[in-house]
Amino acid sequence: MKIKIVIIDDHHLVRKGLRLLLDNLNDFEILYEAPNGEAFFKLFNVNEQKPDIVLIDVNMPVMNGVQVTRMLEEKYPTIRKVALSINNDLGTVKSMINAGACAYLFKDASPDHFHQVLLKVHQQGFYYDYLVIESLLPLKVGQSNFNTPYSPDEKDEDLLLLRQLSSRELAFLNYCCSEKTYKEIANEMEVTIRTVDGYRESLFYKLNIKSRIGLVLFAFKTGVYKL
């Protein structure tokens, strides 16, 4: 069965280029396109088929990418939201991830990379590119890992957050940094998928995080997970 895709981008040429690319790949079916968030939701509400993945341009008129992503995350959290942008600004990347984007794709990505990211997003629910992680967690010059320099207040705050977590929640947080699906994590931890869902929701609440990528970034930043 093909992966159902919707494209939201205010540039006609970009939409047509993405459609041409995806039409040439056997894995995907384009349901429809929209030039902005408002037009997308009008089509979304009348279309019987719901997409598996929505490609969302970050900068659009009428309703921008963050607004679209947040609204979809609130009402349809199982739909994968993939940000599309030429902008690698730290604030923009963070805003999209915090809104619920499960991947952040730069528009100059190669077709092969684009294809693989969409497959990963469909299979495991997210894709974190190390280039994006590096942009979110800036390194000291010469530093070779993902540990971010802290101010004392930031470090204390994160230590307090970590102390709230149970050993099972910490174990789950480590598994989140792998490419395993939630079902595979449940098998590894020898618990039900419902229990894993409970761990995830507990971490979202305790850490004030809204996405798996956010959990991954927190794990890298605090040293819970190291490469």
Image: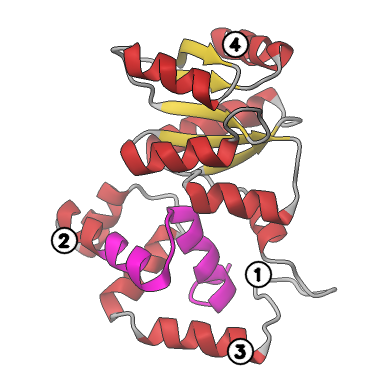
How many callouts does the rendering have? 4
Crowding at dot 4, Cα within 10 Å, few <14 / some 14-19 / many 20+, comes out as: many
Q: Which circle's residue, 3 or 4, is located before the other in the chain?
A: 4
Q: Which circle's residue, 1 or 2, is located before the other in the chain?
A: 1
The x and y percentages for residue 65 are: 58, 36
**29 above or below 209?**
above
Q: Secondary structure at mark 3?
A: helix
Residue occupied by mark 1: 146
Q: Secondary structure at mark 1?
A: loop
**163 above or below 27?**
below
* Residue kind at label 4, given as amino acid type: Arg
Q: Which circle's residue, 2 or 3, is located before the other in the chain?
A: 3
Q: Is residue 168 left or right of residue 130?
A: left
Q: Which circle's residue, 2 or 4, is located before the other in the chain?
A: 4
Which residue lies at the image location 58% right of the left edge and 86% below the top edge? Answer: 155
Range shown magenta: 199-227
Q: Secondary structure at mark 4?
A: helix
Which residue lies at the image location 83% right of the left edge and 74% below the top edge? Answer: 142
Which residue is at the front of the view, 63 or 4?
63
Q: Which mark is residue 153?
A: 3
Q: Which circle's residue, 1 or 4, is located before the other in the chain?
A: 4
Eye-nearest disc, 2 or 3: 3
